[in-house]
Image: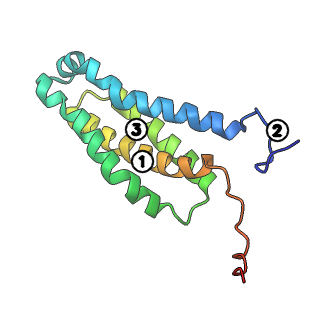
Amino acid sequence: MPSTSGTTPGKLPFVVWVLAAGTFLMGTTEFVIAGLLPELSAGLGVSTSQAGLLITAFAIGMIIGAPTMALATLRLPQRQTLILALAVFSLGHVVAALSTSFTVVLAARVVTALATGAFWSVGFVVATPPRAPRGPPAPPAS
């Protein structure tokens, strides 16, 4: 018997797998940089503590990004918003990977954090099953 979400019980819709993969990737890139700070600082020609700003920049981007991007993309279709967020996220990481400038990598981290905030805020809404509508209130007992 199909559930109210239109899927058979025990099977997750494909979109849930895509959202899970996107969330895993975005969560990983948020934290993996901490283990790479010595290599990043050497490659970018900055101190390790200055390279640590890459973590701070991402965190600030997420704090600002999630609510801001949720409001900014409110009128866009959810699917389009998710695809756009993944595209910006991917492009930002390509730019960061190819750059040798600390400033460019820092800006790319902020941009990818904004995209992550957009993806998570819309993704959580998309992954939440619809609620059954409530009926009218019961008449008072006499």
User: Viewed as shown, does residue 21 lie left or right of 13?
Assistant: left
Which is in the foreground here, disc 2 or disc 1?
2
Residue wearing tag 2: 8
Which is in the foreground here, disc 3 or disc 2?
2
Q: Dot 2 surroundings within 10 Å: few (below 14), some, or many (20 or more)?
A: few
- Amino acid found under the numbered disc labelled 2: Thr
- Callout 3–callout 2 Cβ contact below 8 Å: no
User: Viewed as shown, does residue 54 lie left or right of 24?
Assistant: left
Q: Dot 1 surroundings within 10 Å: few (below 14), some, or many (20 or more)?
A: many
Task: Tell which circle, 2 or 1, labels the residue nearer the N-terminal end.
Answer: 2
Q: Quadrant of residue 31?
A: top left
Picture coordinates of residue 56, whole percent (x, y): 22, 38
The answer to whether 3 is drawn above or below residue 18 in the figure is: below
The answer to whether 114 is drawn above or below residue 99 in the figure is: below
On the question of residue 89 being in view, the answer is yes
Residue wearing tag 1: 117
Name the residue at 45% across, 62% down.
Answer: 72
Picture coordinates of residue 113, whole percent (x, y): 36, 43
Could you tell me which secondary element the residue under label 3 belongs to? helix
Which sits in the foreground, 34 or 54?
34
Residue wearing tag 3: 92
On the question of residue 94 being in view, the answer is no
Could you tell me which secondary element the residue under label 2 belongs to? loop
Task: Tell which circle, 3 or 2, labels the residue nearer the N-terminal end.
Answer: 2
